[in-house]
Image: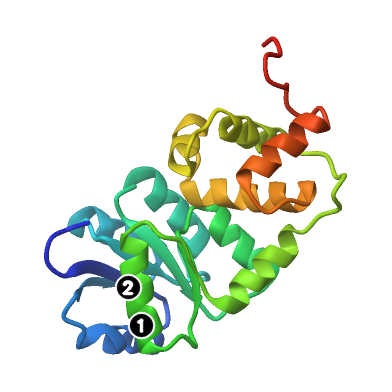
Amino acid sequence: MSAGPLRVVVVDDHTVMRAGVVALLADERSIEIVGEAGDGRAALDLVERYDPDVALVDLRMPVLDGVATTTEIVARYPRTRVLILTTYDTDADIERGVEAGAIGYLLKDTTREQLVDAVHAAARGETVLAPRVAAKLVARMRRPAQEPLTERETDVLAAVADGLTNAEIGRRLVIAEATVKTHLLRLFAKLDVNDRTRAVVVAMERGLLPGPGAPG
């Protein structure tokens, strides 16, 4: 995180919406808007040029949409945190945004205070979800307890069993930390547990992971 005000770029193809976001943050001394873009391709140019702490990115845009833009920023400019700010709150949209590596997902009815807090939290590396979004995401992740784990979910769980943090798991599997958290939500739902330790224990009991001292 940079010294001084947080450097932020605002990406939205709707000029009025973009101006509204900029206006909300204009008087906040701890935040500096360093650039605006109307599509994802222009957003990547801004991120490369200004090295912002946070990119506020709309989901549906021309040229390069929010998911593709997020994926590119996470891969090419990992220091910049992506915070999706959109009107869309369908389950599929939310999951696509989080899977792409966005650190947060806010809706455009957020208040100025909530937006400022979210930008600061995102810059610190904290996941930020609008309450409605969080509820939808958790509900979507709920699966029958006996549903098999995917190969990637097993990889994440094995890394948890090795004592790795979310950031370390992300580095091991070459995925975004936010994606690790999404996989963990799915794991907790499938295993009907509420924490990492219990997930490992239950997985071992069900033979989904080798137990202590097992070969391999």
Reading the chain from its start, which is encountered first: label 1 or label 2? 2
In the rendered image, residue 6, in percent from the top left (x then y), is placed at 21, 67
Q: From the image, which quarter does the N terminus lie in?
A: bottom left
In the rendered image, residue 167, in percent from the top left (x then y), is placed at 44, 42
The reply to whether residue 42 is in sight is no
Report the residue that reaches farthest toward the left.
4
The reply to whether residue 7 is in sight is yes
Q: Mark number for residue 140? A: none
Query: Could you tell me the amino acid type at mark 1?
Result: Arg
Q: Is 202 situated left or right of 128 in this image?
A: right
Above or below for 27 versus 75: below
Towards the viewer: 72 or 52: 52
Q: Quadrant of residue 83?
A: bottom left
Determine which residue is flagged by label 2.
10
Which secondary structure, mark 1? helix
Distance between the alpha carbons at the discs numbered 1 and 2: 7 Å
Query: Could you tell me the amino acid type at mark 2?
Result: Val
Q: Is 144 situated left or right of 108 in this image?
A: right
Above or below for 210 versus 184: above
In the rendered image, residue 37, in percent from the top left (x then y), is placed at 32, 71
In the rendered image, residue 202, in percent from the top left (x then y), is placed at 76, 38
Which secondary structure, mark 2? strand
Residue at image coords 50%, 36%: 169
Label total for image: 2
Residue at image coords 37%, 63%: 122
Label 2 Cα neighbours within 10 Å, binned few <14 / some 14-19 / many ≥20? many
Residue at image coords 81%, 55%: 143
- What colour scheme does the image use? rainbow
Do residues under tags 1 and 2 come within 8 Å of each other at their CB atoms? yes
Determine which residue is flagged by label 1.
18
Label 1 Cα neighbours within 10 Å, binned few <14 / some 14-19 / many ≥20? many
